[in-house]
Image (cartoon, coloured by chain):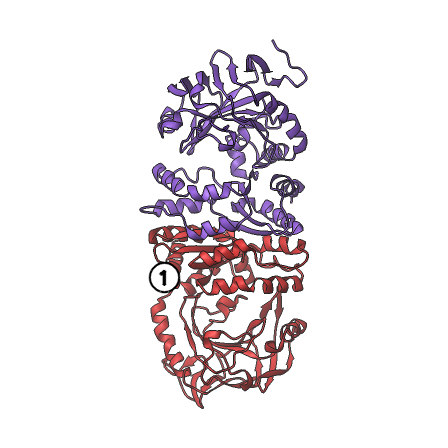
Chain colours: A purple, B red
Amino acid sequence: MDPRIREHAAVIVDHSVGLDAGDNVVIDAHPVSEDLVAALHEKIADVGANPLVIQQRLGKRFRRAYLRNHDGEFEVPEHERALFEAMDVYIAIRADANVSEESDIDGDVQTAYSQARQPLLEERLGKTWCLTQYPAAANAQLAELSTEAYENFVYDAVLKDWDAVRDHQQQMCDIMNGAAEVRIVSGETTDVTMSVEGNETLNDYGENNLPGGEVFTAPVPDSVEGEVYFDKPVYQRGQEITGARLVFEDGEAVEWSAEKNEDVLDDILTTDEGARRLGELGIGMNRDIDRFTYNMLFDEKMGDTVHMAVGRAYTECVGEGNEQNHSAVHVDMIVDMSEDSFIEVDGEIVQRNGTFRFEDGFSEE
Amino acid sequence: MDPRIREHAAVIVDHSVGLDAGDNVVIDAHPVSEDLVAALHEKIADVGANPLVIQQRLGKRFRRAYLRNHDGEFEVPEHERALFEAMDVYIAIRADANVSEESDIDGDVQTAYSQARQPLLEERLGKTWCLTQYPAAANAQLAELSTEAYENFVYDAVLKDWDAVRDHQQQMCDIMNGAAEVRIVSGETTDVTMSVEGNETLNDYGENNLPGGEVFTAPVPDSVEGEVYFDKPVYQRGQEITGARLVFEDGEAVEWSAEKNEDVLDDILTTDEGARRLGELGIGMNRDIDRFTYNMLFDEKMGDTVHMAVGRAYTECVGEGNEQNHSAVHVDMIVDMSEDSFIEVDGEIVQRNGTFRFEDGFSEE
């Protein structure tokens, strides 16, 4: 076994979920991540916790077989609910045998299934949880990398000194928290402002998401003004939207276009009221993620980028008395900030061309 | 997908567990049986039931990683208990990537783990359940068959008209039920008698076990007298016991030997008091199982054989007021009845050289 797999398991158990003796753990994993699941069992035994492996959330082939043959309403299965209620820790491992496995499931059926299972999602999110990635061949293929190169990419992003990451990123959280207005400018195509007043900017250092490496908050829904061009493709339901451009007025997207698959962008933005408003502003700070791999778990943490999500805002980011944006969707889209770009907070430039004010090489102009 | 995989799924869902709409199903499966698990999801969706896939009982590599690193007492994990309590139907699919995966786990640790998890086993056995086999390459290897030949073997044994099997086998149950004494004779080496008075002979036609194909009962514990030579190897904890011979007096094995791995036989018979007494007499009646494959799910149903298990008796077989044999073990061993052999019930020959009294070609002498 690649020794980095056992290191990965150790980071998950010791850092991300901080496992304790007696904890009842559910591991939700595709079989291609078998090595990591075995390594997790070693660590879980060391700690004296209790593992159970399921293949629900990520068993895409099984879900496809089920959904293509299902008819009628969906219910919340009582045995799954009982399992999630009784578990203490949930570890989800992303990995695929074929990333297009769900490409021939009816979109409406997928949506109905997800909506019906919302209580299970909430139950899971109420526990200690971690979402991570195993470098499977199919995911390497999606990233247009050899499997070995992709393994290196994943482990470079995951096997970090997360305490040092936390301290470094906290500097940006401190700048954002207490601030009123954020402006994002990139080239001629992106210039957008939004209020973050009263909302909290959180520090993601590899707990719920592994890799971590971003700070993120919720814009005040009605405050977003300006236009954004998303340089990086958005991969949704097996389709790639490229060159998406959105214009916001009073917080709402009033105009949009895309170079490829504009109809998919239409579908997303017309899902509900909240889908046309921003639910998240995130700033990627993991410089070991140096390329786009069509995997939001990594892409949104890429160094020298920001991302904005249309749709649902995270409750933890929304300050008391502030409005939270609700939606059935949460779709992240990425702006490249490496050139001819800056982030302004309350009128002061805090990042230029990807370099933060608190880093070497920062220049205000 | 081999069309027989979908037929197998249909037999499990429609016949073995008789699935109903709304049933909460747990499928316990090794990843190598992925095709059958996918086919089951189609059927489960058709019926309107709810599937959840786990890899606990049969995820041998994970269990090995866990058990080799575990220290101290085992507990019954509350999340597993909650899951099993809330489920309606349990489907276990046997299949291996490597049948020797557990060969380097300490035997005492395995025993302690199994004993601690006894309440989970009882919870499962209290639900509707089915144990079946997927024809994986490693299981074909154990049977010394090519994978394709093994697939044919498995599907011939599994895809049968189980209603016809039930009716055919019921004739043997009717002979046994109400009888007092059974005698099994084979060649010069096996001649054993036992009382089955007051106990019930059950008909296994593919419900809990798929394939089914046996009738079985419990001997009255103290009644077993005589000697038995087991022609077929016994595969226990990754080791093969061959040529086992047991001599019974007043129901207890008082003398035993084996040609190979006699120490493993010693270990089994000295586990506890009940391990030296017979817990089961079974009569194999599935003639599509025409060879030994080191897999008791098939071997014990082989046509022209009987099997006797030392150890635990099945509660369902033990008549009211009769003693039930208790033990931590239940180890089946097989006698070839195809030549120079007969079964006598209350002094009448009911099978000779594998042919039953109610079948063509039966001759009393």
Q: Quadrant of residue B271?
A: bottom right
Rendering coords of residue B228 (x, y %):
57, 82
Rendering coords of residue B352 (x, y %):
44, 83
Q: Quadrant of the N terminus of chain A?
A: top right
User: In this rendering, would A126 be left or right of B42?
Assistant: right
User: In this rendering, would B208 be left or right of A52?
Assistant: left
Which residue is depicted at the point 46% across and 85% down?
Answer: B197
Image vertical order of residue A187 relative to residue B236, above or below: above
Which residue is depicted at the point 36% across and 29% down?
Answer: A272
Q: Does dot 1 land on a helix, a strand or a loop?
A: loop
**Which of the pair B300/B151 is nearer the observer?**
B300
**Which residue reaches farthest left?**
A72
Residue position marked by numbered label 1 in the rendering? B18
Rendering coords of residue A159 (x, y %):
65, 35
- Amino acid type of disc 1? Gly
**Which residue reaches farthest front?**
A321
Rendering coords of residue A105 (x, y %):
37, 40
Q: Quadrant of the C terminus of chain A?
A: top right
**Which of the pair A77/A106 is nearer the observer?**
A77
